[in-house]
Amino acid sequence: MQKFVIHIEETGESYTAADTRSVLEGMEALGKKGIPVGCRQGGCGVCKVQVLEGQFTRRVMSRAHVSAEEEAAGCVLSCRIYPRSDLRLNVVGAMKKNVCRPADAGAASLSPNP
């Protein structure tokens, strides 16, 4: 088993992922609340990312969610890729809102109404 560093461009966060776990599984380990994980089989499309740099093994994913053109531009479903080197990626689609949320998001003032 090898381990690689996955870097998320939008947040500047990095995490270590084993080559035996999907990029999505590693992302979940960051402890972000509300990461949509959907089917985990490449059929729902909620975990789309764009790999900017690095090598990975890709498993079958639905063309309804990742076209051949998108894939050529590095867009894949994070549940269906396994790192083979360090990766640098952007989060796109449904996951972006939760993965890229600031750490203190939702921590609004709770002062009572007068």
Image: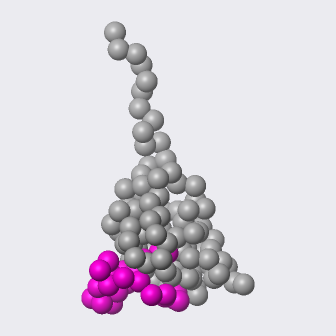
- Is residue 70 visible to the viewer in this orientation of the structure? no
- Image coords of residue 14 (percent x, y): 56, 66
Residue 43 position by quadrant:
bottom left
Examine the rendered structure and indicate whether residue 3 appears above or below residue 93.
Answer: below
- Is residue 84 visible to the viewer in this orientation of the structure? yes
- Which residue, as the protein is rendered here, is positioned at the far right? 1
Residue at 52% of width from left, 70% of height from top?
24
Of the pair 70 and 15, the residue shown nearer to us: 70
- Image coords of residue 51 (percent x, y): 42, 80
Which quadrant is the N terminus positioned in?
Answer: bottom right
Residue at 50% of width from left, 51% of height from top?
33
69 displayed left or right of 53 = left
Residue 74, magenta (yes or no): yes
Residue at 48% of width from left, 77% of height from top?
41
- Image coords of residue 78 (percent x, y): 47, 75
- Specify the segment rendered in magenta: 55-79
- Image coords of residue 69 (percent x, y): 27, 88
